[in-house]
Amino acid sequence: MRPASGSIIPFPAALKKNMPANILNLPTYAVLAVEQNEHDYHVNVEVKQPPTRCPHCNSDHLVGFGRREQLVKDLPMHGKRVGMYVSTRRMQCRACSKTFSEALPDVDEKRAMTKRLVTWIGRQAIKRTFASIAEEVGIVESTVRSVFREYVNELEHHIRFETPRWMGIDEIHLIRPRGVITNIANNTIVELLPNRNKTTVERYFYGLEGRDRVQYVAMDMWRPYRDAAHAVLPDATIIVDKFHVVRMANDAVESARKATRENLTVKQRRALMHDRFVLLKRERDLTDQERLLMEGWTLNYPLLGEAYRLKEAFYGIYDSATADDAHDAFGDWYRSIPHGLHGHFEPLTKAFQNWMPEILNYFEHPITNAYTESLNNLIRVMNRLGRGYSFEALRAKILFAEGAFKRTNSRPKFERRAKQRLKDEMMGYGVPGNEMDLADVQIIEKPAKAPREKTGSTSAPKNYGVDISTLARLIEEGEV
Ligand SMILES: [Zn+2]
């Protein structure tokens, strides 16, 4: 065991001038002595170059005026915390008689920390809990938090995501529901909003660069989203994804199923084994055995059979070729709802009526996101690690994860794969042609060439946001 008091290792005077083994690797400082114990390094240093000019009058007529010791935290090293004890020179100017302390190079202006430590904490704070960083560096957690906030502010200035032309607004549950803004064409996240309020969404829309270029906003049926889009993105077409609508038909079947079961005996219920699983299946996917089961249930519980038929018929509305056809098909379908099922299907019929234009827009612009599965993966891993992080930290983790950005010209070595994947994605959308986005895809297919900026003002590569599946993988692997 090392004695707790530590041991002082003075450097020979001859080495001081040209310190080859500068333990700190900070060239602007001379290391005078190193002391260590089990947990910490205490490094005595001084600034290599004494001041030559008075900061008040710029005279070079300076004399020493004593020293004072300042403790500056530095990067942890060899698993130990590092404190630099700077023997700071006090000087007096002979010309103006004022005294001053020498400036400390490479030290943060606001904190008793080296700049490199501040940078390191910022990057670490995206990956780890504040508490673990505070412990490793030997500072308080609130300092980590404040460094993190500044770091994120800095990132916000440097990392700019392209405003999606096809924007998605989805929900992600991190402690409470949050709004996720996505780029549907690129399967990326471009923003995480603290809540789903209209004002929050509006403020985000207002801040978008080139918001008038947003063509489509795909959303679930959440009124504040629609209100915000109407107010701030009046030219964008709002689309309710098929997925959000048809799952309400499943909910209706589920409601009818539960109501049916309520009045049954235990024996009768047993005959309805696996009913939920079978009833939620699409008809074309039923096995012969399930088909037989279904026929039996329909005979005994006609309303259940009717609910199933209605659900399937509702899916059928989505086979309509045009919005007009879909509108008519919905009318026919609505009139076919038997009396006993109106209540169960009411949430769906109400939603359809309240969101008719947006739901029908889907038939003219069948934009659908291809990332639902990756987003669910992401939500799962985020929830697992979410404890101990603030919303700001989780947001930064999502938005500023190194290695998850989707850029047009960042993947030349994987050209063939990227090409294939993009084509698959494009086919997945089934979206009518869109000049701008097709142009973007063109650029990705030739990654060797730098993309030409339409604005012409900047040569920075485009950043389309955080690739959802890459991010989920990085978090899973503990890389973020
Ligand atoms: Zn002076």
Image (tube, grey):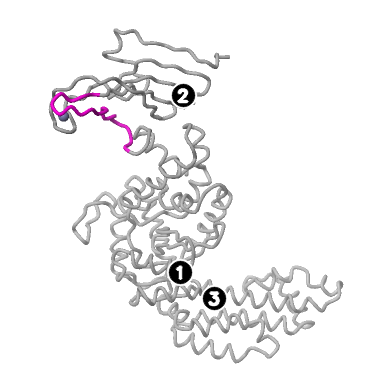
| Residue 201 in picture, x, y percent from top left | 42, 67
| Residue 123 in picture, x, y percent from top left | 41, 41
Q: Return the residue nearer the eye: 350 or 4.
A: 4
Membership of 178 in magenta stretch: no
Q: Nearer the viewer, mark 3 or mark 1?
A: 3
**Mark 1 and mark 2 residues within 8 Å of each other at the beta carbon:** no
Residue type for callout 2: His
- 24, above or below 210, in the image: above
Q: Is residue 45 left or right of residue 137?
A: left
Residue type for callout 3: Val
Report the number of numbered marks.
3
Membership of 96 in magenta stretch: yes
Q: Residues within 10 Å of mark 2 (few under 14, many from 20)?
A: few
Q: Is residue 46 left or right of residue 75?
A: left
Between disc 1 and disc 2, whose residue precedes? 2
Q: Return the residue nearer the eye: 438 or 94.
A: 94
Q: Please report the residue visible at 54 percent of the width from the left and 55 percent of the height from the top.
A: 377
Q: Please report the residue visible at 52 percent of the width from the left and 61 percent of the height from the top.
A: 172
| Residue 16 in picture, x, y percent from top left | 30, 12
Residue identifier under label 1: 368
Residue identifier under label 3: 245
What is the quadrant of residue 424 in the picture? bottom left
Q: Return the residue nearer the eye: 469 or 17.
A: 17
Residue type for callout 1: Thr
- 88, above or below 187, in the image: above
Q: How far separated are the C-alphas under marks 3 and 2?
A: 57 Å
| Secondary structure of the residue carrying numbered label 1 | loop
Instruction: State which region is magenta.
Output: 91-109
